[in-house]
Image (spheres, rainbow, N blue to C red):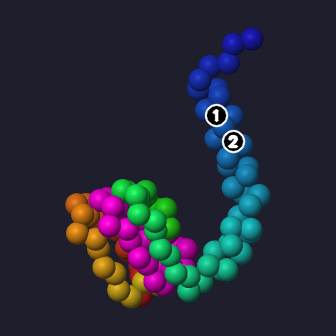
Amino acid sequence: MTISLLTLLEIALGVFFIWGFWNEEKLADANAELADAEAELKDGITSIGANAFAAAGIKELILPESLTVIEENAFAGNKLTSLVLPEGVIAVLPHAFNNNL
């Protein structure tokens, strides 16, 4: 039997959707536990992906000097009130810090 790459992708997406739906309540509980969290990202990280820390309840954030790119909505929906960007940051994509205090 031959399974196409598209079929494998459909199966993987279906499993991911079911897992996400099943764990939705657990994820909400985990986000509630992160309320008012502090985050310090380790040196060596060069980019932060889209939505990586969105709605994680982060109040304080320390970014590494190695950071160069912050993608869309990376820290959207948190509780940040101030931020110091490292000198090496060359790109902060749209809405990276949208909806913070």
- Residue at figure coordinates x 73%, y 52% from the top left: 19
For label 2, the SS is helix
Quarter of the picture containing the N terminus is top right
Which residue is the site of mark 2? 14
Q: Amino acid at mark 1?
A: Glu
Q: Amino acid at mark 2?
A: Gly
74 falls in the magenta region: yes
Magenta span dominant secondary structure: loop
Name, please, the residue furthest toward the front.
43
Residue 26, how many percent across, how many down? 74, 68
Is residue 90 depicted above or below 25 in this figure? above
Q: Residue at x 68, y 67 (%)?
A: 27
Q: Quadrant of residue 6?
A: top right
Residue that mark 1 sits on: 10
Q: Residues within 10 Å of mark 2 (few under 14, many from 20)?
A: few
Q: Position of residue 86 (x, y in %)?
A: 28, 71
Residue 68 at what x, y percent from top left? 29, 59
Label 1 environment density (alpha carbons within 10 Å; few <14, some 14–19, many ≥20): few
Chain part drawn in magenta: 54-78
